[in-house]
Image: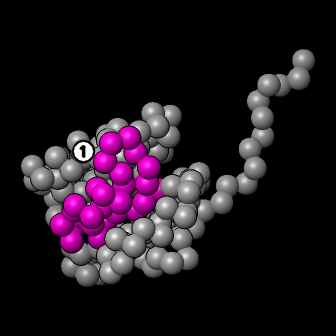
Amino acid sequence: MPSSTKSTPPLQSGRHPKYRSVPPGPSAHAGPLPASGGPCVLVIDDDDMVRRALVRGLRRKYAVTDLRDAESALALIEAGARFDAILCDLNLGGMSGPDFFLNLDDDQASRVVILSGNPDGMDDPRFAGREPRFLEKPSPMAAIEAVLVDMFDHGARAA
């Protein structure tokens, strides 16, 4: 009996050519580091399967908080929560990824990685002068972790 599982093509990932990586400032936690000593990562995606996959892959090394919408994430940050990295979908129901990004203070905005299957969405003119990192969806977990390690290495050197 033939398998009903389909093979997926190789994944494409990388930064949008228009945007460079902006190193984050020193880490600013709302509380102590998790017991593992790992950085705190916020995942915002309204696609439950994508969000769960990201959380599953990241929990091995990081303290992960996941939310379905940008409004809840912004409220959490405005209440004092701080994250070492924020992975945010570009197109969300309600507040969009760019709107979320533009409502953050400079410290938290410097920690954002926009994830999207639509790189053209990164051409938003409101990003001028405040450029987020970008990864095209779907991205393999290794590519996501590489961006996070790069962010955390820059933050450690800046501290």
Q: Is residue 103 left or right of residue 38?
A: left
Estimate how packed mark 1 is, as few (under 14), some (14 to 19) or many (20 or more) residues with alpha carbons within 10 Å.
Answer: some
Q: Out of 101 and 120, give the one closest to the viewer.
A: 120
Q: Answer above or below: position of 99 versus 154.
A: above
Q: What is the quadrant of residue 130 in the picture?
A: bottom left
Amino acid type of the residue that numbered disc 1 sits on in the rendered structure: Glu
* Rendered view: 140 above or below 25: above
Residue 63 visible to the viewer = no
For mark 1, give the secondary structure. Answer: helix
Magenta span of residues: 90-115
Tell me, yes or no, whether the highlighted magenta stretch contains residue 91: yes
Magenta stretch encompasses residue 117: no
Q: What residue is pinned by disc 1?
A: 71
Residue 95 percent location from the top left of the image: 31, 48
Residue at the spot x=24%, y=57% of the render? 83
Locate the N terminus and report the quarter of the image it occupies.
top right
Q: Residue furthest right?
A: 1
Which residue is at 45% across, 33% downward? 48
Q: How does the figure colour the protein chain or chains?
A: one colour
Q: Position of residue 71 (x, y in %)?
A: 24, 45
Q: Nearer the viewer, residue 103 or 32?
A: 103
Whether residue 42 sits left or right of residue 74 in the image: it is right
Q: Residue at x 55, y 63 (%)?
A: 119
Observer-nearest of 101 and 133: 101
Q: State which quarter of the image contains the C terminus.
A: bottom left
**Measured from the top left, where is residue 72 in percent x and y?**
23, 42
